[in-house]
Image (cartoon, helix red, strand yellow):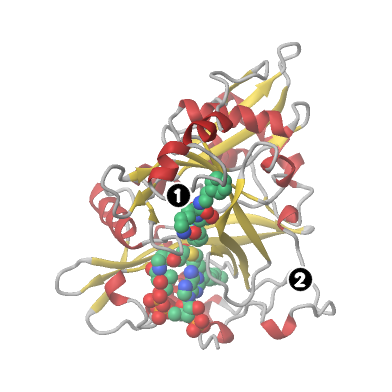
Amino acid sequence: RHKFWETQPVGQYKDVGDFSLADGPIELPTPLSDVKQEPYNLPTAYEWTTCDMDSQETCDEVYLLLMNNYVEDDENMFRFNYSKEFLRWALRVPGYYRSWHIGVRAKTSKKLVAFITGVPARIRVNDKVVKMAEVNFLCVHKKLRSKRLAPVLIKEVTRRVHLENIWQAAYTAGVVIPTPITTCQYWHRSLNPKKLIDVGFSRLGARMTMSRTIKLYKLPDSTVTPGFRKMELRDVPAVTRLLRNYLSQFIVAPDFHEDDVEHWLVPRDNVVDSYLVESPKNHEITDFCSFYTLPSSILGNQTHSTLKAAYSYYNVSTKTPLAQLMNDALIVAKQKEFDVFNALDIMHNESFLKDLKFGPGDGQLHYYLYNYRVRSGMKPSELGLVLL
Ligand code: MYA
Ligand code: JJ1
């Protein structure tokens, strides 16, 4: 049923629920000299390219490939539209390898037709911290679909990850392949209900009018928690301590050091927003919340071309109730003119979703590890990892 995935060191369906299999690598590393030295073969009309995301020109090409060919919802009404600034942030991470930003070009026209990326990360699984690649932005041009190009891209990124002596990976997908470590539900909180309804992102509820709907989703004009402010560079040590301590309770979570927190969580305009609560009394940093900006193109609407969406990222509450903290995040997202605030049912998110008027979406996100087995039956609330 999965001609490609059946050949890969991933959890196989036949092993689901087999508790005799312990956590750990599925296959052992080979000597580096045994890693294939040449790239995998592509159909003859195509060639490999390493995408230099420092180059404005290459970044533009990647941006356009994804804008026109990346992930859509099940009814093809919306398509993710990652910004160039976002792609730079997501790919030029601490210790990144340029060789892991992989493109495929048509030999004659040099047009970019496919893409896949890896970035290095330390991911903790139970009590072990494992060096992994986070694989993302797998994309094949619409005209080249179903030609088995994706397995070639995946094998090539795997080879290049192996060349750096890294043997595990983490990734997410909207499709089911062998075999998810857990399956998460998307939830959505309307900020601009009129636009969401106009573009078909949501529907007017039963026995609801537009004006009642607008009233239902109204938010205060300003945040309510005393000491709530934007995170700054000087907060990195305190936020790292807060976040490390919080993430330690989940089965799978990133092992963030200060340089990671500086990269992933210090605010960047139109890419990532982070707020914290600094106690007005003793200036202690007690709570933290963050979200990233990922607009979607609206396909075939006369009036609106983009849906501005905020995605919940990492949140930690120790003093402020989590629901209040997240309500303040909704308030700032509304001020910044986001149309919708999205979240997965991971970490402690379930505790606030219903109270804050999030509703379940029609999409799911499956989480995967490559060449690493974890106890099957993990719940989304036991997951502490957000991939972009
Ligand atoms: S998830 C986002 C994926 N991108 C999109 O959904 C964008 C729109 N779609 C497309 O561009 C294409 O449809 C793609 C497939 C490129 C997705 N993850 O070439 P094909 C398997 C993994 O004929 P196409 C993200 O970026 C499929 O089951 N495998 O198909 C994370 C089948 O295999 P099998 C996938 O539609 C990516 C084979 O590919 C996915 O033309 C993580 C068919 O190939 C998918 N999302 O192209 C990648 N979709 O027969 C894995 C389809 O066995 C990383 N397939 O069922 C693994 C770790 C690697 C590093 C390891 C280091 C140690
Ligand atoms: O955004 C998504 N669904 C929306 C739009 C649905 C449009 C028709 N298919 C949705 N809207 C309902 C909102 C409503 C607001 C008021 C309260 C009740 C709910 O459900 C979905 C997620 O739900 N998104 C997708 O389908 C996009 C793809 C998701 C898989 C992502 C793969 C990630 C790639 C790895 O990096």
Q: Position of residue 313 (x, y in %)?
A: 59, 43
Tell me which amino acid carries mark 2.
Answer: Ser
Measuring 60% from the left and 80% from the top, which residue is drawn there? 30
Q: Quadrant of the N terminus?
A: bottom right
Q: Which residue is mark 1?
A: 201
Label 1 residue SS: loop
Q: Which residue is mark 2?
A: 376
Q: Most extreme residue toward the top, as rendered?
A: 281
Characterize the local packing of mark 1: few (<14), some (14-19) or many (20 or more) Cα atoms within 10 angstroms. Answer: some
How many circles with numbers are drawn on the protein? Answer: 2
Label 2 residue SS: loop
Measuring 49% from the left and 48% from the top, which residue is drawn there? 203
Q: Report the disc number at residue 162.
A: none
Residue 295 visible? yes
Q: Is mark 1 within 8 Å of ligand 2?
A: yes
Seen in the image, is 57 located left or right of residue 66?
Answer: left
Q: Nearer the viewer, mark 1 or mark 2?
A: 1
Residue 42 lies, with reference to residue 239, above or below; the image says: below
Which quadrant of the view contains residue 22? bottom right
Seen in the image, is 250 located left or right of residue 289?
Answer: right
Which quadrant of the view contains residue 79? bottom left
| Pointer 1 or 2: first along the chain | 1
Measuring 75% from the left and 55% from the top, which residue is drawn there? 382
Tell me which amino acid carries mark 1.
Answer: Phe
Residue placed most toward the observer, 351 or 381: 351
Q: Position of residue 300 (x, y in %)?
A: 29, 54
